[in-house]
């Protein structure tokens, strides 16, 4: 694994972007990407494209982020392969038409269904912190759904972007899939084009730009935007275990994770134990010191290095551990800071680095209030507690894209579970089946038989009371089982017995018919176990 595996990064000529998008749109219109055989072949080629360039990709991630080999393999290379295999295994099942829940006669006559159809040409914009994963995982769903796509890797990870370009251009059909590289000029030109869906991962500021550009074309967008993710450690928690797991989450990719634990809210009775365990954990993780460890990534570039160090410089908190920095190596030591105010600089924005501020808060209600004050809709919520009641109270009172109890990351670490944000942390979701669902249009289709014309005569003018009566009967107008006060109506015991426990005469007839067929029941007739209508 040497630097000769890297290849140069080059931006795409801006003038070529519009023709490229047009070419992909024409390919989609030709229906070339629709057959399952085509989609599956492209996914298989992508799988081997990643595998055959595995070492190049690992080296690129090392060059861009100092990403350890272990993290590069587990969280990028292997994950991509697992996702492809999982979707290949389930694609045809997911793509099958869904039958609609309608009355029996409607289903029999109209054959209604929901078709899962490709949306068109999709734009996927990746992020620098997981440059391969966040570009290719959405793309896998795009291909599986039968779309064409433009992939825009992050220019802040140029070595990875170059390898991603090599993988895609050597593996996929160039008439259906294209890579656009570059910075603001290229991204701006891309957003001037009309796409059928956009998938973006990054910060909220750029997310608003993406959403504004998409709105001009009424283009739906998946936005994964991150947030200030709290770790709430209640008085019933295991402080030592919480410290170990939060420390692991904080140093992963040197804190450059949208799901990263951003700050800790802890009960005062656990503060000393937590701080001691956190420090000891970091010393075990990096026995020779974090600066010498090959297992800690580096900050992606100087701009982000200065942004993070400026947050640390401005804090009014007390550094309990860490604080070492080296600009020449883009190194920031994992740092624990005790703060006393939600107005502290370390809570002013998503840190996206290895700094962990800690607030000591005395009771659960105040913990919830503080978390909501810092960020109403984080991408992730981490609850450390030994009591179910506490967990439920926090979950009910704090919104988040996802949540993990007594650990970090895990709600987003299972490939088959949908991943996405809510409110300020984003909209939409993908991964696993959600990746397929995100890039298809669920199209309802009903086939009205020609011979039904006689039965449809009541819908045509001139209208009469008789036609209205027939139409209402045909549509199955139901009567409410509740009053104007919103409460359910009580039925008399005699009515309940006569109807055999059913909620309508129709249901009662069905239950009487069952009894008349001679079927035996272990329950009295009026509680015969038949599903409700």
Image (tube, rainbow, N blue to C red):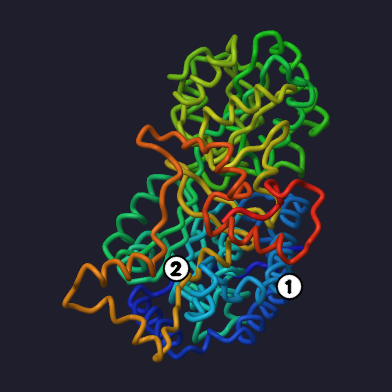
Q: Quadrant of the N terminus?
A: bottom right
Nearer to me, 359 or 288: 359
Outermost residue, left side = 462
Q: How crowded is mark 1: few (under 14 residues within 10 Å), some or many (20 or more)?
A: few
332 sits to left or right of 241: left
Which of the labelled discs sits on residue 59, or is there none?
Answer: none
Q: In the image, what residue occupies the spot 34% across and 86% down? A: 454
Let me know if residue 215 appears in the view.
yes
Mark 2 — residue?
Answer: 123
SS for tag 2? strand
- Decide which of tag 1 and tag 2 comes sooner along the chain: 1
Q: Position of residue 335 (x, y in %)?
A: 64, 26
Mark 1 — residue?
Answer: 89
Nearer to me, 269 or 352: 269
Nearer to me, 169 or 393: 393
Mark in front: 1 vs 2: 1
């Amino acid at each position: 694994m040497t630097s000769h595996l890297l290849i140069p990064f080059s931006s795409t000529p801006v003038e070529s972007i519009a023709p490229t998008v047009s070419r992909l749109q024409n390919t989609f219109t030709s229906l070339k990407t629709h057959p399952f055989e085509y989609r599956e072949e492209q996914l298989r080629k992508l799988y081997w494209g990643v595998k055959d360039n595995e070492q190049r990709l690992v080296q690129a991630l090392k060059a861009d982020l100092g990403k350890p080999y272990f993290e590069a393999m587990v969280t990028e290379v292997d994950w991509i392969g697992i996702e492809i295999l999982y979707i290949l295994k389930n694609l045809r099942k997911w793509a099958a038409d869904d039958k609609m829940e309608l009355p029996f006669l409607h289903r029999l006559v109209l054959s209604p269904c929901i078709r899962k159809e490709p949306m068109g040409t999709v734009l996927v914009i990746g992020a620098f912190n997981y440059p391969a994963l966040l570009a290719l995982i959405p793309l896998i769903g795009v291909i599986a759904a039968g779309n064409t796509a433009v992939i825009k890797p992050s220019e802040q990870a140029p070595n990875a972007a170059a390898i991603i370009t090599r993988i895609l251009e050597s593996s996929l059909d160039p008439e259906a899939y294209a890579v656009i590289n570059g910075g603001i000029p290229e991204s701006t030109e891309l957003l001037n084009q009309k796409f059928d869906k956009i998938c973006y991962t990054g910060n909220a500021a750029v997310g608003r730009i993406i959403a504004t550009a998409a709105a001009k074309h009424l283009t739906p967008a998946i936005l994964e935007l991150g947030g200030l993710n709290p770790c709430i450690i209640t008085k019933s928690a295991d402080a030592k275990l919480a410290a170990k797991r939060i420390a692991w989450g904080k140093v992963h990719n040197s804190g450059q994770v949208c799901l990263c634990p951003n700050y800790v809210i802890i009960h005062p009775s656990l503060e000393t134990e937590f701080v001691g365990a956190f420090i000891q954990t970091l010393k075990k993780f990096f026995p020779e010191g974090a600066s010498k460890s090959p297992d800690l990534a580096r900050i992606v570039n100087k701009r982000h290095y200065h942004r993070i160090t400026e947050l640390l410089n401005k804090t009014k908190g007390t550094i309990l551990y860490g604080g070492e920095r080296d600009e020449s190596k883009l190194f920031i030591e994992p740092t624990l800071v005790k703060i006393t105010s939600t107005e502290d600089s370390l809570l002013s924005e998503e840190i996206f680095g290895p700094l962990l501020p800690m607030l000591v808060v005395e009771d659960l209600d105040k913990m919830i209030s503080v978390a909501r004050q810092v960020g109403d809709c984080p991408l992730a919520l981490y609850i450390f507690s030994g009591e179910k009641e506490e967990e439920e109270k926090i979950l009910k009172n704090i919104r988040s894209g996802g949540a993990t109890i007594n650990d970090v990351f895990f709600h987003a670490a299972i490939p088959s579970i949908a991943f996405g944000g809510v409110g300020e942390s984003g909209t939409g979701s993908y991964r696993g089946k959600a990746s397929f669902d995100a890039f298809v249009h669920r199209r309802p289709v009903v086939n009205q038989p020609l011979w039904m014309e006689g039965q449809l005569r009541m819908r045509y003018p001139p209208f009469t009371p008789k036609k209205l009566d027939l139409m209402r009967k045909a549509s199955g107008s139901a009567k409410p089982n509740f009053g104007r006060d919103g409460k359910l109506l009580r039925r008399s015991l005699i009515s309940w017995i006569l109807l055999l426990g059913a909620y309508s005469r129709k249901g009662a007839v069905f239950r009487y018919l069952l009894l008349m067929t001679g079927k035996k029941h272990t329950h009295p007739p009026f509680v015969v176990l038949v599903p409700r209508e």
